[in-house]
Image: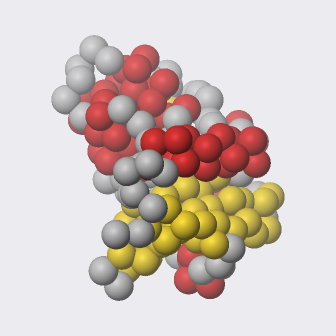
Amino acid sequence: MPVHISKIEFMTCIGKLYYLWRERAGKTVIIYLGNNRKDFLEFLDNIKKNYWVSKKIYFTSKKSVCIENTINDYLNGKTKKINFEVEFMTGTQFQKKIWEKLISVNYGKTISYKELANLAGYRRAWRLAGSALKSNPVLLVVPCHRVIKSDGSPGEFKGGNKIKKFLLELEKS
């Protein structure tokens, strides 16, 4: 059965965001959300390499007003939740488990890399947990900006440290 994936970009208060999404069982499912064009294009290439042969994947340029409004409402402080299903089309089993556990960290809360590793069942793999976040394909929905160092400092963020600080401040209010 062919898979239809929509790809688009849009402007927000933190810059341009790129996203992939599709409808599945009447729900909007996000496959990719990021702010780096190069990463976006690499992600598309990975999907084509890994899925093109086994499944027919068709890409169309179709925006989702629902996704864009929800993301903008979140970034403008009008909503505290981004309730979309996520489909991880890339990543190792370890990375996917880290990303899935991170979704459960609530708005306004932070967690250390060590706590995240423990939550995922990998007590000593906190550095690997940090590495998994560098590959997070769905920024904001998988809230890697909520992961901080054990000493309370922000740490790195795939979307950029300035944006991480913005998001942490936004969620404090």
In the picture, measured across the screen, residue 39 lies left or right of residue 30, that is right
In the picture, measured across the screen, residue 17 lies left or right of residue 65, that is right
Q: Which residue is drawn at 55% across and 67% down?
A: 58
In the picture, measured across the screen, residue 106 lies left or right of residue 39, that is left
Q: Which residue is drawn at 55% across and 55% down?
A: 32
Which image quarter: residue 2? bottom left
Q: How many discs mark residues in the rendered view? A: 0
Q: Where is residue 40 in the image (x, y as percent from the top left)?
A: 67, 48
Q: In this view, does 159 lie above or below 34?
A: above
In the picture, measured across the screen, residue 155 lies left or right of residue 106, that is right
Residue 91 makes an appearance in the image: yes
Q: Where is residue 104 in the image (x, y as percent from the top left)?
A: 32, 53
Q: Position of residue 167 (x, y in %)?
A: 63, 53
Q: Is residue 154 above or below residue 72?
A: above
Q: Residue at x 63, y 72 (%)?
A: 60
Q: Where is residue 165 in the image (x, y as percent from the top left)?
A: 68, 44
Describe the colour scheme in one phrase.
secondary structure
Front residue (pair 92, 50): 50
Residue at the limit of the structure toward the front, as seen here: 53
Residue at the limit of the structure toward the left, as seen here: 121
Which image quarter: residue 81? bottom left
Residue 108 makes an appearance in the image: no
Q: Which residue is drawn at 79% across and 68% down?
A: 11
* Quarter of the image that includes the N terminus: bottom left
Front residue (pair 148, 160): 160
Q: In this view, does 36 lie above or below 120?
A: below
* Quarter of the image that includes the C terminus: bottom right
